[in-house]
Amino acid sequence: VIAVMNVVEETPRAEPQKEEEASPPASQQPTDPASPNVATTPEPVVADAVDKSTSKSADDEPEYEDGRGFGIGELVWGKLRGFSWWPGRIVSWWMTGRSRAAEGTRWVMWFGDGKFSVVCVEKLLPLSSFASAFHQATYNKQPMYRKAIYEVLQMWVILWVWQRFGQVAGPGVGLRVPGHGEPAETAGPCRGHPSAPRLSPAPGATRCFCVECVDLLVGPGAAQAAIKEDPWNCYMCGHKGVYGLLRRREDWPSRLQMFFANNHDQEQDPPKVYPPVPAEKRKPIRVLSLFDGIATGLLVLKDLGIQVDRYIASEVCEDSITVGMVRHQGKIMYVGDVRNVTQKHIQEWGPFDLGMGGSPCNDLSIVNPARKGLYEGTGRLFFEFYRLLHEARPKEGDDRPFFWLFENVVAMGVSDKRDISRFLESNPVMIDAKEVSAAHRARYFWGNLPGMNRPLASTVNDKLELQECLEHGRIAKFSKVRTITTRSNSIKQGKDQHFPVFMNEKEDILWCTEMERVFGFPVHYTDVSNMSRLARQRLLGRSWSVPVIRHLFAPLKEYFACV
């Protein structure tokens, strides 16, 4: 580390920056900081501070062009309150899946854990300030800090070699690692024409193209020709692989998976990446679903158009089984208690392509004061999932794609989370349904599904506001509701326990059909067997959020037959 440190200090920076702020002396730095992913992220400047006279939308405005330096791709040191200076990289807001950073702040992706924070420019230093920002005591004590230092130095060496012996980054380009940018095309995102209009493909697509760059790369008049198409199939979706100078990478699906590979929290190896299966060789999927609930997994697979050959479900709740049998016309084979499923059963029902489940969270959630933890009560059911997942995996020498997914609450003890990750040999991805629905629902997902930690993006059919989920004549008091659980009082909002809806000038709770819309289920999905309102809420409170599972399962269309 010391040998490279001196080289870093001597290297000129690629972009002009503001006058550097002096780093605090070592005596002021904490001696036992943790990874910055648990720190309080500084809030962006409030929107009122921005000039409201501008007519541009936020998405069309240039990013990080406030004259204060620290452009996209630059390696920096960042300071969060209570933590040592930590190495990171300036990234664009779209990479975080969140909102644009306010003027005077930057989105930083931290090395070591891969998390994101908004940081004021006053709390940023260039990587060349290594000697003053590097904290030896933290390096000696914290494995995550040590990992971050190695990662930033590795990236810096690649950049240094690239600039010295390859292409030299010009003004405004910033420092970018070759091969680590756009995984799909050989041209990266445009920053040369920040104010130029953008071409957007058909509804539901998430990429756009700079009009000026399209004419430059594809050919004169290409942008106007694309504008006349309705809908327009973009260059990623078109039949041709080459459009002028714009060439689609042949291995873009694999690159996309590696781009979003899970790489944070603990020292776990990244999941094995399976290459996509050619369309003519894809077969219907065979599923083993443990703790199946109301068959959310099967519902999502059908919505995505994935053909299901076999769906074996373990479930003990009679109401849940009734919903699954009625809504899926007997397509589910129920096998009872997960503890009674043996290796012989797995061999008889298999082979499987997807194993999934979410064991009961009652004894894991820190919200429950009487919780028993991972090794007692219902917490032990996790090990049943682990046992059957091991039995369902392909044997050594069988390279067919096999995927798995395990879900549980975020509000669990640190030791329980660590032990689950250790057994599954995987780091969890935290996904909150508030990004794609009208309710908060933060959950941990462990698994090897491709692109699990890619940004969560809503579709045109997702209902993001509570008002969109309500029946006619009812008015939402909140834009989103808190996490809906099996308890009836979880419908009430805030410390004052407000009802979330107004109707006929009176407060009211959510109706069952409205809760189903909040979760993304079809209306009346749980309306079977004359179940009561509370019974239906219990089923929904234990279920998965449909748009979140759709987000996770969408890449499976590259591996299995679709209708």
Image (spheres, grey):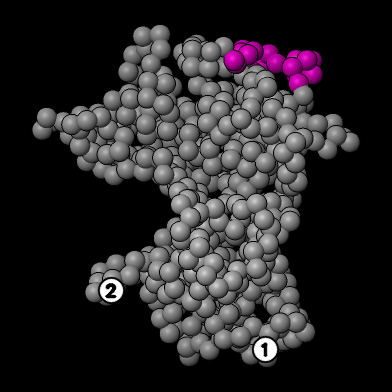
Q: Quadrant of residue 111?
A: bottom right
Chain-order first, disc 1 or disc 2:
1
x then y, percent, for residue 10: 68, 91
The quadrant of the image that shows the C terminus is top right
Residue at image coords 56%, 28%: 302
Q: Is the residue 165 above or below the residue 500 in the image?
A: below
**How far, Cα to Cα, is label 1 from label 2?**
39 Å
Q: Which mark is residue 100?
A: none
Q: Which amino acid does label 1 sit on?
A: Thr
Q: Which residue is drawn at 29% across and 44% down?
A: 479
Which residue is at the front of the view, 356 or 119? Answer: 356
* Residue matched to label 2: 54
Question: Most extreme residue toward the left, as rendered?
Answer: 505
Q: Give the range drawn in magenta.
A: 331-350
Give, as a three-letter code, the residue at label 2: Thr
Q: Is residue 429 above or below residue 193?
A: above
What count of labels does the image hold? 2
SS at mark 1? loop
